[in-house]
Image (cartoon, rainbow, N blue to C red):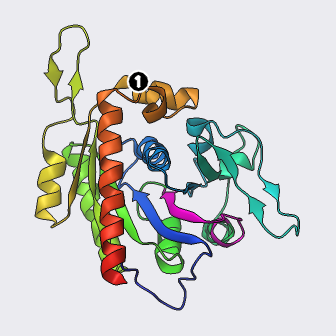
Amino acid sequence: MTQVQTHDRQPIPGVKDMLAISSGKGGVGKSTISANLAVAMARSGRRVGLMDTDIYGPNIPGMVGAEGKPTLTAAGDHMVPIETSGLRTISMGSLIEPGVPVIWRGPMLAKMIDQFLHQVDWGELDVLVLDLPPGTGDVQITLTQSAPITGAIIVTTPSELALEDVRRGVRMFRDTELPIVGLIENMSAFTCDSCGHTEAIFGQGGGEKTAASLDLPFLGCVPLDPRLRQCADEGTPMVDAMPDAPASVALKGIAEDILQRLAGEDAAGG
C-alpha cells in the first residue's frame, strides 16, 4: 500500500508494512482485536511485530503472554522486543512495574513512541501492528506525523455513540493523508450456546452502514463472545486458544483480507 512520505516519516529498517489499529473511543475491544489480528497474521507465515502505543494503559503484554522485560542489543543502543505467541512485542507495560501509573505530558509520550519506533531492534518484519490508544490525542498525532504508517484500521461496535467517534477518527486520518485500510465491527452479535438464539446487543449493521457512508472498505464483523475476553485475560489470543470458534474464524478471515489488500497495494505501488 502506498505510503505518504514526508521528511518527518523516517522508515524503520527491515519493516515492510506498518498498520495502525485505531478506535474513536475506549471499550470497543481494539487491543483484543489488535492482538488477535497480529497472531493470525503470524500464523499465516508472516513475520509480525506488535507495538503497544497506549502508554497510559498498556494491556498488550497480558493479552499475548509477554513476560519479563526487554533486553538490550550487544551494542546497548537498541531494545530487543519480547518474543511471544509468534510475535515480537514492545510495550510500556513491559518496562514498568505492575500497577505503577504513567503520569506524563505530551512531549514525554512523543519521546517514548519515537524510542519504540527507532530504538527497538525489530529485525525483518512483514507487518508491524500498532495498537493505538483510543481517541485522537498526542500519540495519534505523533504517529501520523513521524511514522511511515502504511494504513489505518478502525475498530468500532455497532452502537451509534461509537460510530460517531469513528467519523472523528476518519477525519483525523484523512486530514493527515494517512490511507485507511478499512473498518471492523466488533461485538456485532451474541449467540447463546444453549439455545442458539442470536441477539444484536449493541445494534445491528451500524459498522457496515458507516463504512459505506464514509466510502471505506468494510472488513467484516467479529461476533460478541465472552471467550475473547477470557483468552485475553489468560494471555493466549483466542485465534490460538480456540481457532475454530466463530470469532476466531472471523478474525482470521479479516487478517487474511488485510494481508491481501496490503500485497495488492504494495504491488501497485511498485
Give the magenta range. 116-132
**In the displayed structure image, the side of residue 221 where residue 40 appears, left or right:** right
Instruction: Quadrant for the N terminus, please.
Output: bottom left
User: Is 23 drawn above or below residue 216 in the view shown?
Assistant: above
What's the residue at 15%, 67% (across, down)?
215
Count of all numbered marks drawn on residues in the image? 1
Question: Is 14 within the magenta?
Answer: no
Residue drawn where x is 67% and y is 60% of the image: 104
- The image quadrant that residue 222 belongs to is top left
- The C terminus lies in which quarter of the figure? bottom left
| Residue with the most extreme top position | 194
When asked about the image quadrant of residue 247, the answer is: top left
Residue 78, position as x, y percentages in the image: 78, 67
72 vs 206: above or below: below
- Write down the residue under mark 1: 227
Whether residue 58 is visible to the viewer of this picture, yes or no, is no
- Please report the residue visible at 44 percent of the width from the left and 31 percent of the height from the top: 238
Instruction: Please provide percent x and percent y for residue 113.
Output: 62, 67
Would you say residue 112 is visible in this rendering?
A: yes
User: Horizontal placement of 124 versus 98: left or right?
Assistant: left
Disc 1 secondary structure class = helix
Residue 162 locus on image (x, y percent): 27, 48
Q: Position of residue 5 (x, y in %)?
A: 45, 87
